[in-house]
Image (cartoon, grey):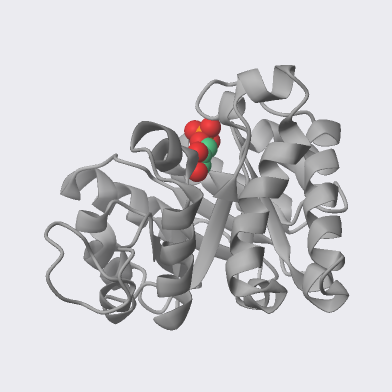
Amino acid sequence: MRRPLVAGNWKMNGTRASVAELLDGLRQEEIPAGVEVVVFPSLIHVAQAVSELAGRSIGVGAQDCAIEQQPGALTGEVAACQLRDAGCSMVLVGHSERRLILGEADAVVVCKFVAAQTAGLVPVLCVGETLEQRESGQTLEVVARQVAAVLDACGAQSLAGAVLAYEPVWAIGTGLTASPGQAQEVHAAIRAQVARLDEVVAGGLRILYGGSVKAANAAELFAMPDIDGGLVGGASLNANEFGAICRAAGN
Ligand code: 13P
């Protein structure tokens, strides 16, 4: 049995005041015991979230980490071990906004994946196709290539300590959600790809769906056999809405 995970990616949003309000709202939400919940604030709000959520069942993660494993001379970056020291348990790697806007290639994503695991953080490896790639029938190939970059470099066993997130780029922040069937097809393909190398790891691997998840569509997505939770952007900035998504994952 895979424990559902609902991850809230706050992206580049929030002020100290709005984050305080959001955290206060989250503390009041009923979170099912069987669901793991982690929020990913902007780096500047990580310490605030860690302190305000202390003793709660909601974890804190970061949205990115440095490619280098050791702290040192890399201006502007934050090492995975520093994130761990600050109280993070997870870190997103390879989010499409970083791949597409900042030009992060698979090789960079792999370095970050390794740095995260070396520091004892669980990497959430994000993969997904653009609209153009979907329309030209390349979805499964693109996603398989992104997953293979990590499998080839780190082996299937590395995914025993990781989470995958399938986020079709065309569904992010657009209000367009992949249908449960469209998402399930890709999730099943990812699991099969891992299973060809290690069936046990594949069986235990949590694969989240991301892209315009909201309370109104979460239940039907989470009902799919290979969807193990969600990576939620916009809707995670509203405590009630996010709480409802977490509860949908518990049903
Ligand atoms: P939205 O939920 O706002 O579409 O964002 C999804 C996402 O990119 C989460 O990482």
Q: Nearer the viewer, residue 69 or 203?
A: 69
Image quarter hosting the N terminus: bottom right
Could you tell me if residue 125 is visible in this image? yes
Count how many numbered circles sit on residues in the image.
Answer: 0
Viewed as shown, does residue 17 lie left or right of 238?
A: left
The image quadrant of residue 80 is: bottom left
Q: Is residue 187 above or below residue 132?
A: below
Could you tell me if residue 28 is visible in this image? no
Task: Give the x, y percent position of residue 145.
Answer: 67, 47
Residue lying at 41% horizontally and 55% vertically, measured from the top left: 108
Viewed as shown, does residue 12 lie left or right of 125?
A: left
Q: Nearer the viewer, residue 66 or 179?
A: 66
Residue lying at 63% horizontally and 20% vertically, measured from the top left: 131
The image quadrant of residue 15 is: top left
Q: Nearer the viewer, residue 95 or 147?
A: 147
Residue lying at 39% horizontally and 81% vertically, measured from the top left: 119
Task: Give the x, y percent position of residue 40.
Answer: 40, 56
Task: Give the x, y percent position of residue 56.
Answer: 45, 73
Task: Give the x, y percent position of residue 239.
Answer: 45, 46
Image quarter hosting the C terminus: bottom right
Residue lying at 29% horizontally and 40% vertically, measured from the top left: 12
Q: Is residue 228 above or below residue 98?
A: below
Q: Is residue 221 above or below residue 138?
A: below
The image quadrant of residue 70 is: bottom left
Q: Is residue 5 above or below residue 120?
A: above
Viewed as shown, does residue 219 lie left or right of 79?
A: right
